[in-house]
Image (cartoon, coloured by chain):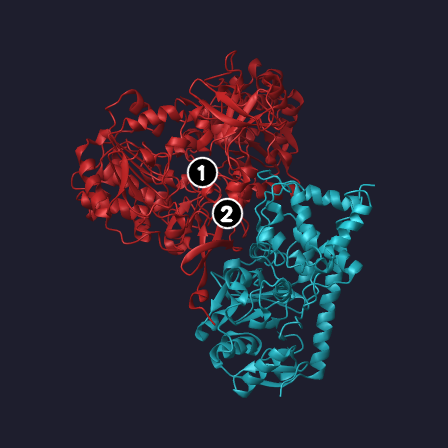
Chain colours: A red, B cyan
Amino acid sequence: MLEENTMDVKYVQTTCPYCGTGCTFNLVVKDGKVVDTAPYHRSPVNEGKVCPKGTYAHEFVNHPDRLTVPLIKKDGKFVEASWDEAYDLIAKKFKQYKPDECACLSSARVSNEENYVMMKFARGVMKTRHIDHCARLCHASTVAGLASTFGSGAMTNSILDIAESKCMFILGSNTFEQHPLIGRKVMQAKAKGAKLIYADPRFTPTARQADLYMQFRSGSDVAILNGMMQEIIKNGWEDKEFIAKRTKDFDKLKEMVMKPEYSLENVSSISGIPVEQLKTAAEWFAKAESACILYSMGITQHTTGVDNVRSVANIQMLTGNLGKAGAGVNALRGQNNVQGACDMGALPVVFTGYQKVIDEAAHKKFADAWGFPDGICEAKNGYEVTTMMDVLADKPGELKCMFIMGENPMISDPDLHHVEKAIKNLEFLVVQDIFMTETSELADVVLPACCYAEKDGTQTSTERRVQMWRTAQAPPGQAKLDWQIMSEIAAKMGYEKQFAWKSAEEIFTEIAKVTPSYAGMNYERLNKPEALHWPCPTVEHPGTPILHKEKFAHPDGLGQFFAVEFKPPAEVPDAEYPFILTTGRCLWHWHTGTMTRRSDDLEAEEPTGWIEINPEDAKALGITDKEIVRAMTRRGEVNVPARVTKNIMKGVMFMPFHFKECAANVLTNNALDPIAKIPEFKACAVKVEKIQGA
Amino acid sequence: MVAKGEMVYAWTSDADIAAKAECGGAVTGLLKFALEKKIVDAVFAIKKGQDIYDAVPALITNPADLKDTAGSLHCGTLLLSKLVKKYLDGANNMKIAMPVKGCDMMGLYELAKRQQVNLDNIIMIGVNCGGTVSPITARKMIADKFGVDPNVVHKEEIDKGQFIIEYEGGHKGISIDELEEEGYGRRSNCRRCKLKIPRQADLACGNWGVIGDKAGKATFVEVCSEKGANLLEQAVKAGVIKTEKADPKGIEIRKKVESAMLKLGDKWRAKDFEGLGEGRARLEKIMKETSRCIKCYQCIDNCPICYCVECSTKKPYLVKPGEVPPNFMFHLIRFAHISDSCINCGQCQELCAMDIPNALFMHAQQTELEKMFGYTPGVNMDLPLMALVEEREERDRLSATGSDQIFDIFK
């Protein structure tokens, strides 16, 4: 009566593949297949708890849509191919192009090891300087902004530390939906008496928990922060000792924020926040024993993204809220391994650990360590993904060949018509992914990869904690590990020696050798539930949960104030496009939906997109709830169901960007921050119309 | 002849097990015997994962692997019962033996009533449980209150009202009362628990009442069923388990320990339930706390009472999909479906992403319902209240009130 196969049940501890919180859970493996998730109580980050995406993180793993064989496009149609055929074609093509004609997109979804291999492949095999990934679209402004203020572009404190805070200001993050288990830390701090200040154009689930909710017009962040700083300085609440000992250029900041433009009255008219609320926020924040800021895309995804980040850094230096418990600039990174992909140098300006490409010594270090007989890419910065798309669309012929791993710019990037034009201008496109995506549809070769449940590797969460993925099942069909695919292509192109790893662990050992902030890490140490936070320079080093304790990471150890002037978004409402459109995620779905929309329980919660409209605006437009309306910007138009809700500010509209059938990014503006080259997803001008005859 | 109701001191004759296990290793010895003699196909138990704070469920078919499950893990807060339903086909196709604490056992009974597990195929070896401590709470408690690095602790135990740790270079105990007053200690559902000796299992085992020269070297075993009697008898006959009659004084002491624990449980119940308020105040508190729900479904997935294939909370006409927090109906459905049978296992609270005291809410309702209707969940095969309701009769009664409210609590 005993069936042999019912006897095989095991738990495999792994890290969540969705947001940057870094929750651990178990995958339940029965008869060799992942069938469920189960709590892992021992995780210091999430203590066994997960959000809905974690609960259902197994549902897409064995979905019938998984890619299982290499595909080559012949006469406009994909035809199944052997790995050898695919590799031969790719190797032949890749060799045809000059380095500057090639570009690579790495992925914040895959492991550190795989990002490292892609980085090495781009710079060593293709010899191109053009490598980037979607961090460009989320926290490029953080990396640039915090690197210039503090000398290091990462979240300063740890997730657990948020629970120690006495005052939390959440600006540009819907923490409860986007980083739910960090939302839990916010609630723990609140339970211990901390105040929560929340600013958002939408009354979100996070707003419900706030002690002070400030509804504001998207894009006025610098004005709000400058106004609060003026109020703080006026009242003498600034931390004079911190400013004197640990920072420089305070006078420049002071001169700027004390200008009459940043009086609370004026900031109120820019932002829409009542003066009294701004006053209360400034007072609570400045007087708290410790105060932290949590922010995410609401701060970064603007043409003033770097300005916004610098303003956040300014107010924290002004109030001495750095380098101590319960304080800090907590830039919540959106994707599971966006921190790690940046750490691994999948960016056009740095190698691993932010060692600059243009630094001759760093360039030589990598060239020597890798030992490519014909050298590596030139010591020159490459194109950002947003620049790549512009070059492709506007200067056809400059870039010809692209290699994309685990990214879907055809849904995730701004102004999708522009992206489509760009990608169609490519001569040769290789995409490796776990599902056929809107992007891979346009590829010449599609390679089937492993998902998180099928691989070992590490990923670095938003708090710089490096944690492990562990193999739970075999990949479907002929799918292979991302690093293995790249290594095999490299071997075909004559670089077998440089890509000779047998395991993810061997790759990690190489990473640790060339990356000072990871130098003290190894799989044995990372396999512990607490894992390690970088920087971790030696094998004895305990890791660094809180940055900038004694001094900042600049050579002089000082924090740099930047006087930042408020600038409106690149596109503001006018008579023709009278509303502000802002975009974001919802709790149930992940980015371009390739995984979550194949998870039945998640898809059932929100099966399609919507546009949120304030009831007064809806009434003026004659639009009712659930009606399909036409949303239009200067870039394009989509038909989308209206969601009439008082939870959104009058004059502002919101769309989630997960849904291809009503893709918000058809509408968004490809205007870029001048420094970080991040697009302004969070504000553009939109109009909405009834569909006639509908 | 071993008979139901008998109480003995028992220990293993297997030196390997004795070295690793606690209190003479009777439990591990019995499990090993059951597996070796093919009385069961597998043992489903908890083993130590990465460290003493990490409990991992394990399905064991090789008797040699059983040594990994020996010893107690008070930081093991998981509930095994639902896993039998979810991953072992409800033990319908295999015979298993399981060490069970009170809540594991109660969960199995409730699942069995709902035909989700087959108790005929399960040997429940009950183990006394004074309560468990969540792993991260335990580590924080050891660092803050004991002043010891939790990474160097190699053993923890709960004995004589103290939480005791052993570490390189020493051991230390602090009274549980003191720890719990300061917010550490056992999970709140464990504090309220009144099923400390699982007598409704096949055997009830533990160290309470083992006195004299057998103290620390034998396990107190109460034989609770024919199945339990058979297993023990065969093991004794085979010479793998040794027994002697329990000392009458030991039996008294065991009772005393139990009644002290039960009194403590009553104290915590009074305190926790009082804190909830009554009537409207209680409802308002529940509504406020549940307003941070993110609908992660862990409370439902891990509840040993939930078993529906189609969950009412996923019916769009009852709970609007996509809403965060979900409509209060989400929680009302849980209360309506579970509260009569809640066994206070604590999973819905332990695993709540937003630390909503779900177990407290449900347990408070269960105790009220128990007072009203006399139904005690988890201790036998008696059917739950809802199973006894005549639906048509109830609908007629409701219809006659001329309202859709059975109780108008807002009056």
Mark 2 residue type: Gly
Image position of A532 with respect to B255: above or below = above
Query: Residue B405: x and y, percent?
Result: 78, 44
Looking at the figure, which quarter contains the N terminus of chain B?
bottom right
Q: Helix or strand or loop: what does disc 2 sit on?
A: helix
On residue A593, which mark appears? Answer: 1
Q: Nearer the viewer, mark 2 or mark 1?
A: 1
Secondary structure under the numbered disc 1 in the rendered image: loop
Q: Would you say residue B179 is visible in this rendering? A: no
Say whether residue B101 is visible.
yes
* Residue furthest out toward the top: A575
As drawn, the label of residue A301 is none
Which residue carries the number 2 mark?
A54
Kindly identify the amino acid type of the residue bearing the numbered disc 1.
Answer: Gly
Q: Residue at x 46, y 33 (%)?
A: A659
In the image: residue B225, left or right of residue A126: right
Instruction: Determine whether A19 is above or below A385 in the image.
Output: below
Q: Are marks 2 and 1 on the same chain?
A: yes
Quadrant in the picture for residue B128: bottom right
